[in-house]
Amino acid sequence: MRTQVGIVGAGPAGLTLAHLLHVMGIESVILEHRSRDYIEHRVRAGVLEHAIAELLVDAGAGDRLRREGIVHHGIELQFAGERHRIPLSELADGRTIVIYGQTEVVKDLVALRLDAGLPLLFEVSDVSVDALESERPIVRYTHDGEAQVLECDVIAGCDGFHGICRPSIPTTVLREFSREYDFGWLGILAAVAPSNDELVYAHHERGFALLSLRSPELSRLYIQCRPDEDLDGWPDERVWEELQIRLGLDGWTLAEGRVLEKGVTGMRSYVAEPMRHGRLFLAGDAAHIVPPTGAKGLNLALHDVQVLADALGAWYRTGSQALLDAYSTECLRRVWRAEHFSWWMTSMLHRADADGDFGLRLQLSQLRYVTTSHAAATSLAENYVGLERV
Ligand code: FAD
Ligand code: PHB
């Protein structure tokens, strides 16, 4: 088989890239090793930056997003028993965030792809990439028990952090930068109306907690836990009890409901440079990971593929490689801004035993500063809603 762009991975990055290319008349084949059902029900991110929501709408992939996405104009930071609002849009030129689950983004893009009869193969195995430095890179894979070879002009490695594309780049070429955190998040999805109109990021001496949502009937909540926390030790009652303590405020109640999903996410900061090797272009989690406290992972992934689609469009139209050559540098500028912001939010809000009481006092001072200084709040707001130029 031959195609113009071979895409490994049908996460948000791979699916969005395929759609943007299709709009420009560029062919692609998406190879995904999980099933459709699995990728459509993998609960992950929920916050879209203003410009990223616009990207999906402008590309014709945002009909349901426009109808069902919930626009928020602020977030709240809670510490020392008080809640403080950060008026995002007031501080960031009217820009907002849109609450719309990653599962929904994926469902919308899969439906568009399959309805148009375009190639998206699920449950492929033994995927490998080869001849990356030639003009005919290839993807090998097995589908329905048969070994296949896909010849491409370029390959997009959109296969997430544990994919095969990044490890195919020689270690002499790739530089890796990372930081581990000694905590994770235990997240639940619950069948109960969100108890607050806006997201609440809570600093608490027992550890961080976050109140978020997916819809008027679905709450998404997280508590800081150990990175290897055993879910067996967390029956639903204990999760609610801990959420009540960490999010609790005089005169406010957290409504509880049936827990529909529960999982633990480890935390990591990671960047691989460059995001290109020969005709292989990495995008999204395949190239970088942020801890979720800044709500940046999904947004960065979609930004990467927007840059890549524009560069491929220019190349096919004009033959010029200039934008492809600039791809890695262009993406990494935004990636590092998001890395810093995500690390900063994480450090400000999580309990870190190694930092002791000194660290705790610094966090409280920073939280007070961010919620009382116009300059500091503006900095948080413009990073949170997404910077237009970085
Ligand atoms: P992915 O979504 O990881 O997609 C990669 C795809 O490639 C997957 O479908 C995978 O099955 C497929 N694949 C992997 N290997 C192969 C292979 N060899 N062959 C073919 N296909 C392959 N971000 C936030 O902003 N907020 C959050 O709350 C949040 N929670 C998260 C929770 C978890 C458990 C994880 C892992 C991430 C979370 N993130 C969150 C990050 C966010 O979800 C990611 O940044 C986003 O999914 C990146 O999209 P992607 O398409 O680059 O990668
Ligand atoms: C979510 O709703 O899943 C969510 C929201 C904000 C974050 C991370 C996750 O920072």
Image (cartoon, rainbow, N blue to C red):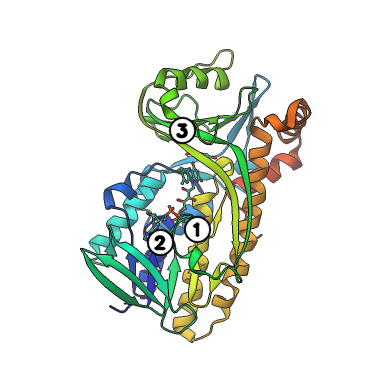
Q: Which residue is mark 3?
A: 187
Q: Which of 210 and 129 lies nearest the eye of the viewer? A: 129
Cα gap from disc 2 to disc 1, whole angstroms: 9 Å
Residue in the foreground of this view, choosing between 250 and 5:
5
Q: Amino acid at mark 2?
A: Gly
Q: Hey, which quadrant is residue 139 in on the image?
A: bottom left
Which numbered circle lies on residue 93? none
Closer to the chain start, of discs 1 and 3, is 3
Residue 188 position (above or below residue 162): above
State whether residue 282 is above or below residue 183.
Answer: below
Is disc 2's CB within 8 Å of ligand 1? yes
Q: Spatial distance from mark 1 to mark 3, Cα to Cα? A: 22 Å
Badge 1: few (under 14), some or many (20 or more) residues near its Cα, within 10 Å? many
Q: Is mark 3 within 8 Å of ligand 2?
A: yes
Judging by the rendered image, the residue that carries numbered circle 1 is 284
Q: Residue 234, image x and y in percent?
A: 44, 23
Q: Position of residue 221 (x, y in %)?
A: 47, 30
Query: On the image, numbered disc 2 is attached to which residue?
Result: 14
- The local secondary structure at tag 2 comes to helix
- In this rendering, position of residue 308 left or right of residue 60: right
**What's under tag 3, amino acid-wise?**
Gly
Beta carbon of the mark 1 residue lies under 8 A of ligand 1: yes
Which element is circle 1 on?
helix
Q: Is residue 185 above or below residue 337?
A: above
Callout 3 crowding tier (Cα within 10 Å): few <14, some 14–19, many ≥20: many
